[in-house]
Image: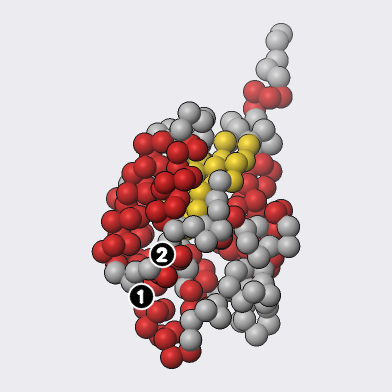
């Protein structure tokens, strides 16, 4: 009697692409393997060893940069899963929630057009007041703004029936006190290896939900 080969029981491979800014790129990690996106990919490979990975993210990119320079690289690929993290750098140019909404919606539309068969995992707005870049007097107001933008991004992601990663919650309320763990690297802006590890642990369920049954 002919028995199916072992490969017949292996889950399908996943072709993962990453778009975005410094968080998507992994700026602050001591090496690539300690970055957020790579850690998520490593979790995927544990169950799907044949999976592939391409990171098109560029540090300091805005939503517009991702739309113009990174999304086109998805065209013609066989991408199954897109992780996009963008928005924090746009705060340097605008604090208008409606502008954020328009830009973010256009970004998701473009991703779906470029990779129509892919599952999209979109991250929200991190709490940038956890970095050294925001003066103490401005932190309460900027924190509220980040929360509003994050909520808006969530609604847009849900409207596309994509999966949302709540970066505001993860960065605003870490699992351990900042006094115990250095969540940021030495530059005071980007996550440390530990910070990326915690973000990956909290973000992976969003990916797992999308891949369930795939």
Residue 190, image x, y percentages: 60, 69
Q: Residue furthest top?
A: 1
- In the figure, residue 96 lies in which quadrant? bottom left
- Which residue is found at the position 48% from the left and 86% from the top? 135
Where does the image place residue 130, in percent across and percent down from the top left?
53, 78
Q: Secondary structure at mark 2?
A: helix
Q: Is residue 186 left or right of residue 16?
A: right
Q: Residue placed farthest to the bottom in the image?
A: 137
22 shown above or below 69? below
Residue in view at x 42 percent, y 70 percent: 92
Residue 93 placement (x, y as % from top left): 38, 68
Q: Is residue 112 left or right of residue 211?
A: left
Label 2 neighbour load within 10 Å: few <14, some 14-19, many 20+: some
Q: Is residue 207 among the parts visible in the rendering? A: no
The 10 Å Cα crowd at callout 1, few under 14, some 14 to 19, many 20 or more, is some
Q: Which residue is mark 1?
A: 145
Task: Identify the residue position indicated by label 2 in the image.
Answer: 90
Residue at 40%, 79% (x, y): give it.
Answer: 142
């Amino acid at each position: 009697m002919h028995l199916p080969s072992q490969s017949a029981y292996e889950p399908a491979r996943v072709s993962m692409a990453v778009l975005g800014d410094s968080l998507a790129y992994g700026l602050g990690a001591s090496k690539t393997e300690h970055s957020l996106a790579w850690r998520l990919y490593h979790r995927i490979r544990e169950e799907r060893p044949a999976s592939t990975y391409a990171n098109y993210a560029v540090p300091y990119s805005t939503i517009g940069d991702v739309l113009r320079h990174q999304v086109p690289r998805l065209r013609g690929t066989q991408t199954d899963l897109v992780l996009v993290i963008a928005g924090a750098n746009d705060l340097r140019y605008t604090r208008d929630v409606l502008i954020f909404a328009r830009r973010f919606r256009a970004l998701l539309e473009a991703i779906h057009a470029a990779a129509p068969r892919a599952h999209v995992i979109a991250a929200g707005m991190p709490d940038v007041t956890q970095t050294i870049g925001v003066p103490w007097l401005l932190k309460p107001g900027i924190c509220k703004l980040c929360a509003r933008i994050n909520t808006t991004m969530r609604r847009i992601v849900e409207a596309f029936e994509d999966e949302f990663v709540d970066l505001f919650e993860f960065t605003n309320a870490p699992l351990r006190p900042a006094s115990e763990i250095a969540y940021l690297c030495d530059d005071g802006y980007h996550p440390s290896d530990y910070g990326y590890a915690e973000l990956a642990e909290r973000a992976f369920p969003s990916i797992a939900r999308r891949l369930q049954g795939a």
